[in-house]
Image (tube, coloured by chain):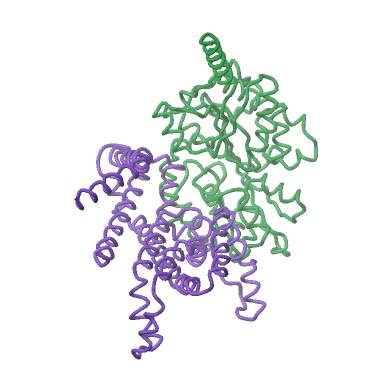
Amino acid sequence: MLSFLSQGRRGSGWGMALPALLLLLAFFVIPVAGLLSRSVTEPQPGLQNYETLLGSFTYIRIFLNTFLVSGVVTLITALIAFPVAWALAIMSPRIASVLFAVILLSMWTNLLARTYAWMVLLQQTGLVNKLLMGLGLTSQPLQLTNNLIGVTIGMVYIMLPFMILPLYGVIRKIDPAILQAAALCGATKGQALRRVLLPLAAPGIASGALMVFVMSLGYFVTPSLLGGTSNMMVAELIVQQVQSLVNWGMGGAAAFILLVVTLALYALQLRLFDAEAR
Amino acid sequence: MHKKALALAAALTLAGGVAQAQQMVFTSWGGTTQDAQTEFWAAPYSEKTGTNVLQDGPTDYGKIKAMVEAKAVNWDVVDSEFDWALQAGKAGLLEPLDFNVIDKSKLDPRFVSDYAVGSFYYSFVIGFNPANFSGDQPKTMADLFDTAKFPGKRTFYKWSAPGVIEAALLADGVAADKLYPLDLDRAFKKLDTIKSDIIWWEGGAQSQQLLASGEAPIGFFWNGRLAALAADGMPVGISWENNITAADALVVPKGAPNKDAAMAFIAEATSAKAQADFAAKTGYAPINTGSPELMDAEVRKTLPDTQTGTQINADMAYWAEHRDEIGTRWYAWQAQ
């Protein structure tokens, strides 16, 4: 009887997911398969596109740079987002909802507009440099755009909500009494954070980090406007290949390598964290 | 009742058919350029012919190729770069233009081919912020590449296109009439000498922002963008020495659904009046030889047609042939 019930539930679950699955099939799986087939057929059949991409230092550097930027952005975002999520979880719901609105508001503003705003703020004659020099902290304007610094600042800002939200969801469910118990048992604040709070929040950190990392891997607008060409990311390479050189083969191959790496990371995360949860 | 419904259905079908015949899609790069194209080309064309012009964009070569291959083209006229148009025509991606409809006798022959006519043309010119160079002012391509004499960041067009490679060769001492075939090794070697001082601009608005803010006090710009800055009251220095012309093209993708409307649209867009009005608004030059006489003398002064002394025409045929090869090297060099 019980197994029958749970089976029935599972069946209806598939039914509910069907529209989304069909949508994914039509607008994701099929186009990606098409792109994959172009990457091994254009300009002629074979693996030469993958050979070019993985055999040249220039292209490998673009991939490494993409992972480096995504990793740094994920780390900094997590470091900033954790205290924010914690504060949101323990403050009064009314104030928290106002803060949430502020965080979400930034997401509703056009991405291009936000990136241009950073460009103007960070350039040599921009507000940030003027402020630093006015305060006497620097004597020369710092180079904050057209390099990794600009890309990192711009992307951390854009990615923050995607880290705060999952973290908040997990932290809110942590019973504050557990921390009291830790303190009663003689844990210092640092120990309570390291050995109680962080392990309990780990699933939230992991899902936030995965989301931010994967989104960063494929980011185009911000790196393109705030970064220089010598630290290009994969998405820019794909745009160049497809839009400017009309080379669907190379663009497809680069996109496919990115997809494989992303899926591998996702599988890794499932193994590490879902196994723990079970 | 049944009859009525049938009649209604028939009427709707008919209306649908008519509506379809009376519209076409024009695709361009967006921004102020496409606004001007809408105002001075599409609007008068719609008024004369009753055909509604839908605007789309931005131009995307990958998309055109994909549409033509899938035989599902929904762009009728596209504004593209001229060298791409020549290459795409050869590759079978474009419809041949109908010169019974488009009057090519009035068009600048530099910008006419079987598959493309000029949309507008422009010059790459040296632009600088006079506040940064109070003594000697930059004049030649060699100055543009001389960071000792004219220190500061310089801004160049990011995408692989005619212009910057030629500038590097000229700066390195190649004679204007010996530019082609392009010596890419030499050009990249020259570009290497200023690589860390280059800030790339991706679009016209960004180039203006970089110059006006002083982020890059000197650079290589589309002349129209500098004219627009000057018109806004910004102090802008321009050197026309060895200005390098390049052009945009109007093309019809192969299998475009409204081919006849497309040809008629191109005829209107390249007419003397449409070209003159567009040029006056954007600072780009008209490709119709009858346009200059329709234009205000003050505006004409800012156009590249009056700067032919040391002017160099980028070799579009050469670029069309070597576009992929140069592009691949260009982007690999940038990423190094």
Q: Position of residue A100 (x, y in %)?
A: 54, 64
The answer to whether residue A35 is seen in the rendering is no
Q: Is residue B164 above or below residue A216?
A: above
Give the colour of chain A: purple
Q: Residue at x 66, y 62 (%)?
A: B214
Residue placed furthest toward the right: B297
Please indicate whether residue A245 sits to the left or right of residue A200 in the image.
right
* Along the line of sight, the residue nearer the viewer: B119 or A89: A89
The reply, left or right, for residue A249 in relation to residue B155 is: left
Quadrant for residue B117, please give it: top right
Residue B271 in percent (x, y) is at: 68, 25
- Residue closest to the eye, A221 or A91: A91
List x then y, in percent, for residue B70.
39, 29
Horizontal arrangement in the rendering, residue B3 relative to residue A134 (left or right): left
State whether residue A196 appears in this view. yes
Q: Nearer the viewer, residue B32 or A11?
A: A11
Q: Is residue B230 left or right of residue A198?
A: right
Chain with green colouring: B
**Where residue B59 appears, x then y in whole percent?**
53, 38
